[in-house]
Amino acid sequence: MKLHADKPTHLNVFTGYGADFVSVNQQRQNGSLLVLPTGIFPWRPTSFADLQEEDFASMLEHKPEMVLLGTGSRLQFPHPRLTRTLMQAQIGVDAMDVSALCRTFNILVAEDRRVLAAVLFE
C-alpha cells in the first residue's frame, strides 16, 4: 500500500509499507529502525521476542514525547517492565501493527509532534 502526504514537507513521513519494509520519503527501509521527524536510525532488536529494556531506554536520547511501537503485521504488547524507563519519563508508548504505525506517525508529524516510530518486522 502507498501512502501520500497531504503537503510537501522537509520532515520524514512514511510513504509506503509491506510485509518486510517501510518506505520513508520514498526510500525503502528494511530491518528494525527508529524513525523520527528529522532522522532515521538502525535499531538493535531483530524481532518482538528480542526486545529488551535497554532498547526502550535508549530512546530517551531522542527526547520523544511519545513512542509508537510497530510490531509487524500483528499487534503485540510489550511487557510493562520493558517500557518502564519511558513511562517513568512520562513518555507514552503505543503498540500497533506497522500499517497503523505508518498512518499514525504521519498524522502526528503533521501536527508537529515529537514522535518516535520504532519499527519491527516478524
Image: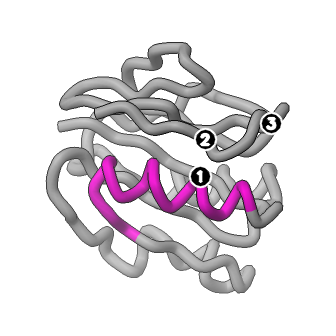
The segment highlighted magenta reads 95-110
Which residue matches tag 1?
106
Identified by mark 1, the residue type is Asn
Circle 2 Cα neighbour tier, 10 Å, few/some/many (<14 / 14–19 / ≥20): few
Q: Residue at x 76, y 66 (%)?
A: 111
Element assignment for label 3: loop
Q: 69 above or below 32?
A: below
Kindly indicate whether the residue at mark 3 contacts the one at mark 1 (C-beta within 8 angstroms): no
- Name the main secondary structure of what is drawn in magenta: helix
Q: Quadrant of the C terminus?
A: top left
In the rendered image, residue 96, in percent from the top left (x then y), is placed at 32, 64
Identified by mark 2, the residue type is Ala
Which residue matches tag 3?
9
Kindly indicate whether the residue at mark 1 contacts the one at mark 2 (C-beta within 8 angstroms): yes
Of 91 and 16, the residue lying toward us: 16
Q: CA distance from mark 1 to mark 3?
A: 11 Å
Residue 5, disc: 2
Q: Residue at x 50, y 48 (%)?
A: 118
Element assignment for label 1: helix
